[in-house]
Image: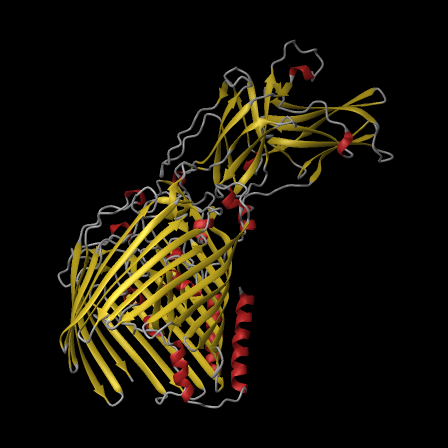
Amino acid sequence: MNRILFFLTTVCFTVMSCTKEKTDYEAEIGAVVTEHEEFKEAVSIQHDGYDIRVEVLNGTFYKGYNEIRLKITNSQTTEQADVSAVTFLPIRTDTDGSTGSCPHQYDLGDRSNGDYFSGYSVFTSESNGDESWELYIGFTIGGQTHTVKQHIAVQEQPNKNLNMTAFTGKDDKQYVIALISPQKPKVGENDLVAGIYRFNKPLNPSSGSFPDPSQFLYEEVRGYTLQLDPRMPEPSMGNHSSPNNKDLTQQGDGLYHGLVNYTMTGNWTLNLIMLNQDGRILKGTEVPTDFTPGVEGAKSELYIDILF
Amino acid sequence: MKKLSITFFVLFLGMNAKAQTEPAQSDSTKVLEEVEVTAIAKRKIETELKMSVSVDEFLASSDNISFIKRGAYAWEPLLNNMSTERSTVTIDGMHIFGACTDKMDPVTSYVESNNLSTIDITSGQEGSLHGATVAGSIDLKRKSTPFGLARKWSGAYQTGFEFNNKQFFNLGNLSYSSDKFVADGSIAFRKAGNYYDGNNDEVLHSQYNKFNSSLGLAYKTSSLSSVRVDAIFDMAKDVGFPALPMDLWLSRAIITSAAYKKLFEEGLVRAWDTKLYFNAIEHYMDDTKRPENLVHMDMPGWSTTYGLVSRANLKRGEYSGDIQLNVYENLSIAEMTMYPQDRSNRTMFAYSWPWVTTRFAGLSMNNSWDISEASRLNLGGSLGWNYNRSKYVEFNWIFHPGTPQEKNRILPGLHASYQLNIKQFDFSVGAGYGHRAPSVSEGYGYYIYNSFDRYDYIGNPDLKNEISYEANASAGFRNERMGIEATANYFHIQHYIVGRILSLGSPMNYQSVDVKGYTSLNYATLFNMALNANYDILPHLHWKGTLRYARATDDKGGNLPFIRPLSYQTSLHFMHREFGVQTSLNGDFAHDDYSPEYGEDLTPAYSIWNISADYTISFKNFKTVLQVGAENLFNKYYSTYADWGNIPRMGRNIFTSMKFSF
């Protein structure tokens, strides 16, 4: 009997110790994507007796969309300063000295959400030898306006789900489309959120004092549509796509919301067609819908790659 | 998983400990009663032609079974020309579900002929005793030696070699029977290479290796009660599936149960048998031996089932019946990971079965009354509750947005039949009604590639129950020298589940052409009939013949797939003293009613001729049978209507075997 029991135990354990472990689904989804939820201080400036702190997710400015939280406190009392208005202007300087900006919120929102002024900045390039970024922050206390300038480092966005693209539309205007959400997609249906920004060329020459915000005007476009066709471009996936996706349209928050279904993890391309409020195509082409195994999927002339 | 195995092991210990402490009395007259209670027409696991057969070959010799074949191993049994989702396949009433999304592991592939005593095949709703069904039930009965046999030890050893695919097998089983303790054990090895078709071409990837062992221990706890524990361990390795784009690297199954049985000398309840069971299957596919594959994929699958089956046999006067409670929970998981050509890129992951739980609880009943000497009325029914839950329901939401994560279904069933026996004539008529729930793949499958019609299949959690209305009839005549019997059944199945092109999404598997979703037809109808005859030409020369026909159409009159065309089998059996010769001819007519919509094409008619001879040597209690024979004697090149991807069947196969028993 003992031998039989021993045999059974052995059989039980050899069989139960599965040859291949089941995939840990949560870990698999997060394998190449790190989700940042915590706002951390990215820069801190002392100016005229005030502490100005800029907080972003993970404490790092990344290329693409960054939500900005700006805190201003009295250096001595460490209490919130009585600020009536805050302006925010990111400026890019090239090696030849030419300057530009990127989509941003110039007048930051009030402190209704907490102890910070909120805004965003969509950095269109990383800091490197050729390009550097500076923040010009202005704040008004008791009718007096203070301005500070701070050099910052913009890093490459490792999470491709927060990718962006910059292009010129058929209306000869410069546009930026930046992905905002989801940071960490899942297999299945995802709410897709993007911002569409247009650079408005200055109508008047610069006033002389640098920086002149009227020279760096970006605007969230109104009433556009982003037609969406998500596909897996790798040859092995043969231009695979997913059903039940929804084009992105503008919602109350000014951002563009739609639905994207990812049928599996991996590399996906969001093929886009951008239409203006009159339904005119400003950028983007239809992509073939055929299933073509072994052939890399063609991309729209307007697309953003993601990976999860 | 570890925790489960420990629980299970403790259960084992408990049963055995109990077995050892309780006193027992021997009572040999009860042995007979027990046999009588469980006796159903039993057939030995061997065919007319061949004595050492695989489970598949044995099933193939049954009237209402046909097979989808994807290679030389693990054939998928079709009952009444309906696929395995529509029938319940059980081992001693225990539910087991394969772990492969491509049906490479039907339940029948996890047993071996030397641990089975017989296979009960019940057509239609009469098979609802083991749970909700449409087509019927296939119950694989394990060997279970009675207590207190005159010969304490018995056993058999079979070995043989089949020349076509160089199959070498060794099967052994041993039983011990005393007044209060019984043990059954078996072990089996089979190893086969690639087979050759009728043109003498090698069919690549058709090899297999199988190991199977089983152990059953029973202890008589009192003169009328006993406990029994059983375990089967099965492992198949390096199994080729020539019709599929991938092979099997490894599949393993552990199938265990602990049962308590009690007999009653008086009263309505004559026997009560309760069994707790657990089985776990793991199945790993392998496409690395197919260089033509563009994409390398890992496709592991797991299926774990716990259950309880409790059955009471009733008898009083002219009445006899069975009541059975079936309860089980199954968890089916299947993953796919695709590797891009550039292996530095990210692998792509999805679930083809997103952790689908199935729970079932049902009560079934079969009753029969002997109305008179010549007639009998059978009435039965079942009522079941079926519950499904998909853990990662987001996979199902892609095609069915917002579908509930959980689904409850009520599955009723009813059947009645009347049998009449007038002199040498037998007649029966019957009718049935029953529901079945969609299978895991039909409900929750996700991009399951079907290499037959080359579509990716998507399950639909909101499918309606399939509802079957069934009628059957038979008529027969029998005398000392001959017998003839005709049987027929007709199914009208509402909400018949099939795959339909979705025009939504795009394929994921690179061989695939498009996506099909499981949907319900308004209805489909199936008609099966069989004509059997036998005649004793001489005292030692027997003839047998079978003719089978089936026809099935959907609601628009189109053909359903995998319906067997008109087929026949005829055999002669000569036996004299220790010598026997058998020969048989079987074949199908052309498959004219094929279904192009489901990827079928016209399969031409074929017929093959088989022959075998055996010689028996008896010495005291020892018996040795030697057999030599040939299947497909004329080396005909053919494939059948249900050969996946029209792969050719085996050409001439000379087989030899030796069986030694005591």
Foreground residue among B559 and B78: B559
Q: Residue furthest front?
A: B372
| Render colour scheme | secondary structure
| Left or right placement of residue B216 versus residue A73 in this view | left
Question: Is B614 rendered above or below residue A304?
Answer: below
Foreground residue among A227 and B88: B88
In the picture, the quarter occupied by the C terminus of chain B is: bottom left
Residue B75 coordinates in the image, percent (x, y) = 31, 60
For residue A124, say whether it is visible: no
Question: Is B172 rendered above or below residue A79?
Answer: below
Residue B395 coordinates in the image, percent (x, y) = 50, 45
Question: Is B610 rendered above or below residue B513?
Answer: below
Q: Quadrant of residue A68?
A: top right
Q: Residue at x 54, y 36 (%)?
A: A160
Foreground residue among B392 and B375: B375
Q: Please give the count of numbered marks on the rendered protein.
A: 0
Q: Quadrant of residue B374?
A: bottom left
| Left or right placement of residue A232 versus residue B638 in this view | right
For residue B302, say whether it is visible: yes
Foreground residue among B167 and B554: B554
| Left or right placement of residue A252 versus residue B71 in this view | right
Residue B459 coordinates in the image, percent (x, y) = 45, 47
Q: Residue furthest top?
A: A204
Residue A250 coordinates in the image, percent (x, y) = 60, 26
Q: Quadrant of residue B490?
A: bottom left
